[in-house]
Amino acid sequence: MLSARKSAPLFTLEGSDGKRYSLAEALNKGPVLLAFFKVSCPVCQFTFPYVERLFERYGAAPLTIWGISQDDAQDTNDFRREYEITFPALIDTDRYDVSNDYRITNVPTLFLISPSGTIALSETGFSKPDLEKIAAEFAAVSKTPPSVFFAPSEIVPNHKPG
């Protein structure tokens, strides 16, 4: 997969809602978090509620969070309903053009892209420390005090391979 400090490939994809989404346009607003997934992936099913938590806390800030689905719109929407995902899910085509551009080999894979178009963070699988870093970055962008992302009472592993 593409690593930090590399340029993020630009793309435009259709969302599961039928709208068109452009990375170039989103970067004009602020940082972008891309979360690549497949609906059948157990680690994706584990990870996406935490990505949703990011969206709930910081989605109104000048930033963007998108899921990039490697499934069709119907299966993607079923996944979104089942896991209560409200951020947009974009559909990578049957050829997985965007996944291939980002050199995805496993899912979930997360990319935090700075407004300059440079990848600030890339991670495959679930990473508690990386989600905490993303939450801190989003708190700074939204000009809100950083908060505890994982409650002390939550039992969450540091990593789960994708």
Image: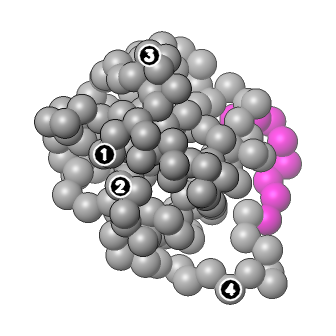
* Alpha-carbon span between mark 2 and mark 4: 24 Å
The reply to whether the C-beta atoms of the residues labelled 4 and 1 are less than 8 Å apart is no
Q: Amino acid at mark 2?
A: Lys
Is residue 74 shown to the viewer in this render? yes
Q: Position of 133 compared to 57: left or right? A: left
Residue under numbered circle 3:
20
Q: Amino acid at mark 3?
A: Arg
Residue 103 picture location, percent across and down: 18, 47
* Alpha-carbon span between mark 3 and mark 2: 20 Å
Dominant SS type (magenta): loop
Please tell me whether mark 4 sits on a helix, a strand or a loop.
loop
Between 32 and 67, the one nearer to me in the picture = 67
* Circle 1 crowding by C-alpha within 10 Å: few under 14, some 14–19, many from 20: many
Write down the region rendered in magenta.
Answer: 141-148
Q: Quadrant of residue 99?
A: top left
Q: Position of 134 compared to 40: left or right? A: right
Residue 161 picture location, percent across and down: 35, 75
For marks 4 and 1, give the one nearer the viewer: 1
The reply to whether the C-beta atoms of the residues labelled 2 and 1 are less than 8 Å apart is yes
* Circle 3 crowding by C-alpha within 10 Å: few under 14, some 14–19, many from 20: few
- Give the mark nearest the N terminus, 2 or 1: 2
Residue under numbered circle 1:
70
For marks 2 and 4, give the one nearer the viewer: 2
Q: Quadrant of residue 101?
A: top left
Between 45 and 109, the one nearer to me in the picture = 45
* Circle 2 crowding by C-alpha within 10 Å: few under 14, some 14–19, many from 20: many
Residue under numbered circle 4:
155
* Alpha-carbon span between mark 3 and mark 4: 38 Å
* Alpha-carbon span between mark 2 and mark 1: 5 Å
Residue under numbered circle 2:
38
Quarter that holds the C terminus: bottom left
- Give the mark nearest the N terminus, 4 or 1: 1
